[in-house]
Amino acid sequence: MKALARTMMHNRRALADKAMKAAITARLKAGKDLVSPVCIYSIAEAHGVRVTFNDINMEGMYQRGSPPRIHLSSRRPLPRRAYNCAHELGHHLLGHGSSIDELRENQLVRPWDVPEEYSADTFAAYALVPTLGLRNAFATRGLKPETATPIEIYRIACQFGIGYSTLITHLLWGEGMISRARADALRKFTPRTLRAHILGSLTPNPLIVADEAWGGHAIDAEVGHLLLLPSGTVAHGDAIASIADLEGGRLFEAKRPGLVRIDRPGTEWAAFGRIARTAYVGRAEFRHLEDDADD
């Protein structure tokens, strides 16, 4: 049994190493560095993979063909969709066959026990959150993974466009930056309770926090999402609207699809917001197109 366990661990390490290298190569071939957060949909398109959001009750699907396609559920939360896209892109770039990934909560087999699923998950984690980028995210905020608060972890998850629990899993198993006890302590907090702590009240609306260390990359959101931006931030456009000034920053709500320039007068802090329709269905690259005036 011990020999079998050692063999399985060795195999997993080999799979993880291959998937991590594939993720690095995928970013570089798409013209991306190994530090900054990325739009995974643009990386997929750069590799010739067409990404579409569909009204389907599953995580996603990879379809080999000409062109290869990734189908994602528009019903899933925005961070989950990005992760699912990276997962399906992993199937493509690692040479796997077509696959259908059902809802995680409905899976009878643990995905990490299936080599191709484990590889695709590992690829997704490193494609979205490269090691150098993760270390930089903590360093620029003066934080350490073992002592950062749950809210600080939440902010870094927002920066990379992934879920809070996904980041905890990657810190534990992918990077070995936190202990299992630390991961268990962080998981006692949910995104819902963290939103309540940050905003001072409960809300069902998803919240994206872009702090001073955000780094200038685009903020992806959907209509109805809340955005907590640095105090004094101004939006140049009506896709988002300021609704409150809080102790932690200026709170905005995404009002309609479109692009919006965001900056903080008197400072170098600036970003673009890309707002999509709620539960948008269609090609990923068109998700933030503005509504027609005649609609």
Image (spheres, grey):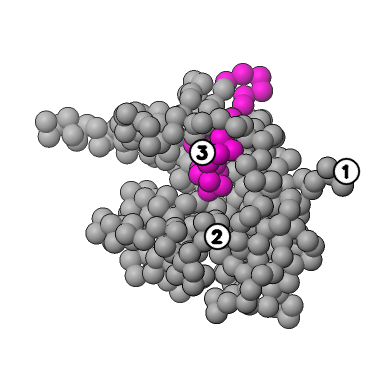
Number of other residues with Cα within 10 Å of mark 3, as a class: few under 14, some 14 to 19, many 20 or more: many
Amino acid marked by disc 3? Asn
Residue bounds of the magenta highlight? 64-88
> Given the image, on which type of amino acid does mark 2 rest?
Leu
Residue that numbered label 1 is attached to:
294
Sequence-first disc among 1 and 2? 2
The answer to whether marks 3 and 2 mark residues whose Cβ atoms lie closer than 8 Å is: no
Q: Earlier in the sequence, mark 1 or mark 3?
A: 3
Q: Position of residue 28 (x, y in %)?
A: 60, 44
Q: Secondary structure at mark 1?
A: loop
Q: Nearer the viewer, residue 152 or 238?
A: 238
- From this view, report whether residue 236 is shown above or below residue 17: below
Asked if one can make out residue 137 in the rendered structure from this viewpoint, the answer is no
Q: Find out whether residue 78 is within the magenta segment.
A: yes
Quadrant position of the N terminus in the picture: top left
According to the image, label 2 marks what residue?
Answer: 207
Q: Residue at x 33, y 66 (%)?
A: 146
Instruction: Please tell me whether mark 1 or mark 3 is closer to you in this view.
Output: 1
Residue placed at 68% from the left, 78% from the top? 232
Nearest the camera: 241 or 44? 241
User: Mark 1 belongs to which amino acid?
Assistant: Asp
Asked whether, in this view, residue 281 is left or right of residue 171, the answer is right
Q: Which residue is mark 3?
A: 84
